[in-house]
Amino acid sequence: MDPIQTSNHIKDILSQNATADVKQVRELLAKARELKGLTLQDVAALLSVDDETLLEEMFHTAREIKETIYGNRIVLFAPLYISSECANNCLYCAFRRSNKEIVRTTLNQKQIADEIEVILKMGHKRVLLVAGEHPVRCSIEYMEESIKTVYETKVGKGEIRRLNVNCAPLEVEDFRRLKAANIGTYQCFQETYDPEVYKVMHPSGPKSDYLYRRTVMERAMEAGIDDVGIGPLLGLTDYRFEVLSTLAHSQELDEKFGVGPHTISIPRIEPATGVEISENPPHVVSDLDFKKLVAILRMAVPYTGMILSTRESPAFRDEVIKLGISQISAASRVDVGGYVMGDRKDGQFSVGDHRSMDEIMQELLSDGYVPSFCTGCYRLGRTGHDFMDLAKPGMIKIFCHPNALLTLKEYLEDYATPETKAIGEKVIAAELNSIPSEERRKVTLERLKEIESGKRDLYF
Ligand code: SAM
Ligand code: SF4
């Protein structure tokens, strides 16, 4: 791959589709409703839309697609930052090597277990392990040990059932070790797909090698990790370019491996201690453009999970979820050791959503969502290609929806306040009616009863 050539190709598609009339946009929205995705040219045309009425129609279509495929389920997870030591100097990140304004920490195994205990007591079942890139402090052995600690730490009936990883790119043999350690998704963001901007943003350290990062998922997939997560860091360059490049990346993986990324993340740069650029990013993405890009991604890759983090404020987050988000982080701490010690402003960036887990659960339930802690697919080997085969609207209703209700029930039994429990029980009772198969409804009801009498970890 020649990064400059690839980037010019994307820029050409954008300039060749820099306008779209009403008729074309409506045709594209109709095409999106067929749930077969969109081409790069289609997406470039939609990215050019600024007209308010057309944007509203776009949002409406995205909501419809989200509703058809994912229903009202929303999967929750917690990030766990284990090290802020880093050999790189990414201009936007508080962990960058030359930042003297944060105190550096790498958690030992006892501290990791302590963090997990707090996370478990909130009711989480999924964790995303995050680390800086440090050859000694964050060695593959340290990562393996940390993963083991996370899975082995239990509190009462609580346990982490799926651990995903966001760490620096590795060689195939090290990815094999992560796979053997039982990770779910491997996540790595390209940050910017523009090689020139990339060079400026990553002036030194191993991360300055654009191609090594751009080819990371090929190595992960070669090692057998078939759930991978990609994404740009929004704010470094024109968002239209980043969105189109992310989709091109997704198509490329699909063509090479028969399956696209499991998830796409869309972080916006947030203010971080000691990081000038984070206060004033070169290409700020407005809330409206952010909503537009979420809607377009939902239409373009309808079956790919989309993740929103606590970087966004609660009110805005609720608005965006409806447009196509399938996973959110909840009650996150981005300070290393932050679940035990609280926020010390040494974290990777500032969090926009400070609600507790129970508050988030209560709000989601009151807004008509079914918060899910399900990890069923991954544990039954329904990953990569198999997951994509399954991720058709009907199948999601048969597996994901009942599993969401079972894991919600566990939350209500073990962690919810009485108010949240009362709301949650009503939601479960109502949602049971929307399980299409009578047999599946009957078994789900039986399993809900089993959970009430103390059984855990039941899934389809
Ligand atoms: N060090 C590894 C790497 O860079 O790939 C993994 C961990 S890094 C902390 C995870 C992600 O955080 C980065 O890929 C970047 O997109 C994001 N990030 C860094 N600084 C940020 C900021 N100021 N606001 C929002 N996200 C940021
Ligand atoms: Fe290090 Fe990752 Fe932050 Fe860059 S983004 S400074 S590699 S932790």
Image: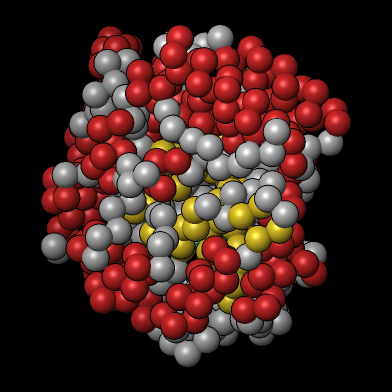
In the picture provided, is 162 more to the left or to the right than 382? right
On-image quarter of the N terminus:
bottom left
Q: Position of residue 19 (x, y in %)?
A: 29, 26
Observer-nearest of 169 and 162 = 162
In the picture provided, is 207 more to the left or to the right than 409? left
On-image quarter of the C terminus:
top left
Observer-nearest of 163 and 290 = 163
- Can the viewer see residue 349 in this picture? no
Q: Position of residue 317 (x, y in %)?
A: 63, 36
Q: Determine whether 294 is above or below 94 in the image.
A: above
Instruction: Count how many numbered circles sit on residues in the image.
Output: 0
Observer-nearest of 375 and 302 = 375
In the picture provided, is 62 more to the left or to the right than 280? left
Q: Residue at x 14, y 64 (%)?
A: 2
Q: Determine whether 453 is above or below 260 in the image.
A: above
Q: Quadrant of residue 348?
A: bottom right
- Can the viewer see residue 454 in this picture? yes
Q: Residue at x 16, y 44 (%)?
A: 258
Q: Position of residue 378 (x, y in %)?
A: 39, 47
Display colour scheme: secondary structure
Q: Position of residue 368 (x, y in %)?
A: 65, 19
Q: Residue at x 45, y 75 (%)?
A: 144
Q: Quadrant of residue 195?
A: bottom left
Q: Residue at x 65, y 33 (%)?
A: 451
Q: Residue furthest bottom?
A: 136
Q: Determine whether 87 is above or below 314 in the image.
A: below
Observer-nearest of 235 and 170 = 170
Q: Determine whether 346 is above or below 426 in the image.
A: below
